[in-house]
Amino acid sequence: NRLDPIRLAYAALPALRDAVGETAVLAVWGERGATVIALEESARAVTLNVRVGSVLPIAASAIGRVFAAYLPESAWMRVAAAERGKAGATN
């Protein structure tokens, strides 16, 4: 009960950003998919379309693909189907 992985990840995010020299993003799996809960921007000028609270697409984002690779299919298929439905509705 003493280990809080989210708190540990928040604390590690600046060091990760500094180690790789890139913007670091922390996301968790929520009801609507991969949800950004923190980010540490790099010193380089980079345009971001991601903000805290953003829900990232499963197939079209690296974070979404990581969740799809490691979560059971039953956990992400409903979200993927909803994404496909939205894409079909806009075409």
Image: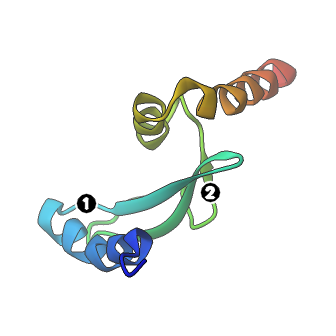
Residue displayed at 71% across by 48% down: 31
Tell me the element at label 2.
loop
* Residue picked out by circle 1: 22
Tell me which amino acid carries mark 2. Answer: Ser
Residue displayed at 38% across by 81% down: 2
Tell me which amino acid carries mark 1. Answer: Glu
Residue displayed at 86% across by 22% down: 89
In what quadrant of the picture does the N terminus appear?
Answer: bottom left
Up-down relation of residue 61 to residue 11 (above or below): above
Total tally of numbered discs in the picture: 2
Q: Residue 25 location, x and y as percent?
A: 40, 60
Give the CA distance from mark 2 to mark 1.
19 Å
Q: Residue 56 location, x and y as percent?
A: 58, 45
* Residue picked out by circle 2: 54
Mark 1 surroundings within 10 Å by alpha-carbon count, few (fewer than 14), some (14 through 19), many (20 or more): some
Tell me the element at label 1.
loop
Q: Quadrant of residue 42?
A: bottom left
Q: Is residue 75 visible?
A: yes
Q: Residue furthest front?
A: 1
Up-down relation of residue 1 to residue 78 (above or below): below
In what quadrant of the picture does the C terminus appear?
Answer: top right
Q: Residue 58 location, x and y as percent?
A: 55, 33
Q: Nearer the viewer, mark 2 or mark 1?
A: 2
Mark 2 surroundings within 10 Å by alpha-carbon count, few (fewer than 14), some (14 through 19), many (20 or more): some
Up-down relation of residue 1 to residue 45 (above or below): below
Labelled disc at residue 8: none
In this orientation, which residue lies closer to the viewer: 70 or 56? 70
Q: Quadrant of residue 75?
A: top right
Q: Residue 70 location, x and y as percent?
A: 40, 34
